[in-house]
Image (spheres, grey):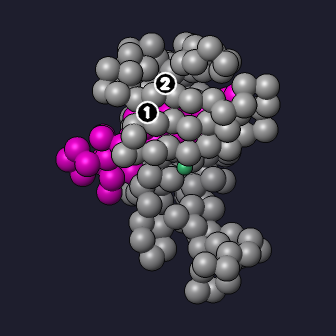
Amino acid sequence: MIRVHDALPELPFRPAAIAWLHAWGMRVDVRDPRSATGGGFWWPDRKLVDLFTTQAEAAIHEIAHAWWHPRRLEGQNAAEMIVATMKLSEESDSRYARAREIAGYYVYGIPSQRDDNSPTGWWMGQLVGQGNDWECYAGLASAVMGDIGKLPPYVRRFYEELFDEPTRG
Ligand SMILES: [Zn+2]
C-alpha cells in the first residue's frame, strides 16, 4: 500500500513500482480533490496520470496504463496480454468470477450497449477489429481493484511487480 498523491487514498501498489514510475517521469494530477466520482486519462506523451477526482478505481486504472505503457512493447507482452484475456473469459474457477466477467465483455462486447462508432451499433469489446491490450491491462487492474489474488496465475503474472501481494482468504 502506498499514497501516490496527497489527495488520494492509499492504494495497493508496491512502493518499488511507484518509485520506478516516478523515476521514469510519471506525474499524477488530481483535478478536484473534493470529489470521488471518478474519471481520468493517461496522457502517454506527457507521462501524466490526469485524474478528475480522488476515486481509487480511476487511480488504479490510469496508473496501470502508465506501468503497462513501456512494458507492452517488451518481447511479446502485448499479444500475451490479449491471449491471457481470452483465456480468462473462459475461466471456470469462481474465485476469479469478477475478472472473468470483465474479460468476457472485452472479448465478446456487450450487444445491449449502444455504440454509435461501431459498425453494428453496439459495443463490440476491446479485441474485435483492433486488439487492445491497453484496455485489457488497465481494465482488469481496476476490475479487481489491484487485488491480484482475484486474477488466475496466467493473468496475475502481468501485475506482480506493480501491485501488492495477494491478500490471503
Ligand atoms: Zn483505460
Tell me which residue sits at (50%, 53%) in the image. Answer: 135
Question: At which x and y percent is residue 64?
Answer: 48, 37
Q: Quadrant of residue 144?
A: top right
Question: At which x and y percent is residue 150?
Answer: 59, 34
Q: Which region of the structure is painted magenta?
A: 54-81
- Specify whether residue 55 is painted magenta: yes
Kindly indicate whether the residue at mark 2 contacts the one at mark 1 (C-beta within 8 angstroms): yes
Q: In this view, does 91 lie to the left or right of 154?
A: right
CA–CA distance in space, label 1 to label 2:
6 Å
Tell me which residue sits at (63%, 62%) in the image. Answer: 105
Tell me which residue sits at (31%, 27%) in the image. Answer: 24
Tell me the chief SS of the magenta region.
helix
Question: At which x and y percent is residue 115?
Answer: 68, 75
Direction bottom: furthest residue: 119
Q: Quadrant of residue 90?
A: bottom right
Per the image, the residue denoted by label 1 is: 159
Whether 20 is drawn above or below 113: the answer is above
Mark 1: amino acid: Tyr
Mark 2: amino acid: Phe
Whether 127 is drawn above or below 72: the answer is below
Q: In which quarter of the image is the C terminus?
A: top right
Q: In this view, does 10 lie to the left or right of 86?
A: right
Tell me which residue sits at (48%, 24%) in the image. Answer: 163
Identify the disc placed on residue 163: 2
Q: What element carries label 2?
A: loop
Front residue of this view, candidates 53 and 74: 53
Disc 1 within 8 angstroms of ligand 1 (CB):
no
Identify the disc placed on residue 143: none
Q: Tell me, yes or no, if residue 96 can be seen here.
A: no
Q: Tell me, yes or no, if residue 129 can be seen here.
A: yes
Front residue of this view, candidates 101 and 7: 7
